[in-house]
Image: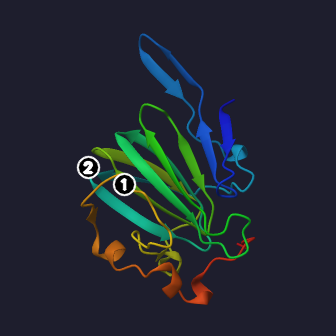
């Protein structure tokens, strides 16, 4: 059974420290199991993101979709921010460093803004519990001073979409997630 770390800084975020088994041939580990997560729903899609060092993705959020992230190559700094109005940890920001060496999985509930900075060339595999829905692909400015994200890189490479995300205060109230979420 892996070690499950329930993060007090942001309600419902879970970090998984899997059991790693190895011998002279290599190693084996179970990276995800739905039963590990109280809010876990059936994951329906797996995706892979390959990024060069100094790339920054985010901050994205969903009103209905949960994510599970796992770095399989390289190093990343994951930044999470609780946007959920009424959450016990509303407004909290958390940075988590993860890499292929530490075998950390991160469960991100709906309503928690998330992004990552590539501290090296990297590959992130992620699972989601909903198919792509453009109405549920939302974002907040990665450099919003009210969020205060510490990305760990300077001069980030950012997509036009992420560069144009609004500041937190400019998000219309109907696009802010509410706690608890109803899916």
Q: Position of residue 72 (x, y in %)?
A: 41, 39
List the residue tagged with mark 2.
53
Q: Secondary structure at mark 1?
A: strand
Dot 1: few (<14), some (14–19), or many (≥20) neighbours within 10 Å?
many
Q: Position of residue 165 (x, y in %)?
A: 40, 79
Q: Is residue 67 left or right of residue 100?
A: right
Instruction: Say which residue appears at 32% left-offset and 46% top-offset.
Output: 119
Dot 2: few (<14), some (14–19), or many (≥20) neighbours within 10 Å?
some
Instruction: Say which residue appears at 65% left-offset and 72% top-offset.
Output: 84
Q: Secondary structure at mark 2?
A: loop
List the residue tagged with mark 1.
117
Instruction: Say which residue appears at 60% left-offset and 63% top-offset.
Output: 92
Instruction: Say which residue appears at 61% left-offset and 88% top-offset.
Output: 173
| Image position of 75 with respect to 162: above or below | above
| Image position of 144 with respect to 6: above or below | below
Q: Is residue 54 left or right of residue 15?
A: left
Of the 4 image quadrants, the one containing the N terminus is: top right
Q: Is residue 10 left or right of residue 79?
A: right
Q: Is residue 134 left or right of residue 50?
A: right
Q: Position of residue 114 (x, y in %)?
A: 50, 62
Q: Position of residue 130 (x, y in %)?
A: 57, 66
Reading the chain from its start, which is encountered first: label 2 or label 1?
2
Task: For marks 2 and 1, give the CA distance.
Answer: 8 Å
């Amino acid at each position: 059974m892996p070690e499950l770390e329930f993060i007090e800084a942001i309600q419902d975020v879970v970090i998984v420290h899997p059991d790693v088994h190895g011998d002279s041939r290599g190693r084996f580990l179970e990276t995800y199991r739905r039963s590990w997560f109280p809010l876990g729903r059936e994951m329906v899609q797996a995706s892979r993101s390959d990024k060069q060092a100094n790339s920054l993705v985010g901050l994205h959020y969903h009103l209905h979709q949960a994510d599970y992230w796992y770095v399989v190559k390289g190093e990343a700094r994951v930044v999470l921010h609780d946007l959920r109005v009424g959450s016990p940890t509303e407004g909290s920001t958390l940075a988590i460093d993860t890499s292929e060496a530490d075998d950390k999985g991160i469960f991100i509930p709906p309503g928690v803004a998330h992004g990552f900075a590539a501290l090296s060339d990297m590959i992130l595999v992620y699972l989601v519990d909903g198919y792509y829905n453009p109405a549920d692909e939302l974002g907040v400015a990665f450099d919003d001073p009210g969020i205060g994200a510490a990305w760990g890189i300077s001069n980030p490479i950012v997509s036009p979409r992420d560069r144009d995300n609004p500041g937190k205060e400019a998000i219309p109230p109907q696009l802010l997630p509410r706690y608890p979420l109803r899916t």
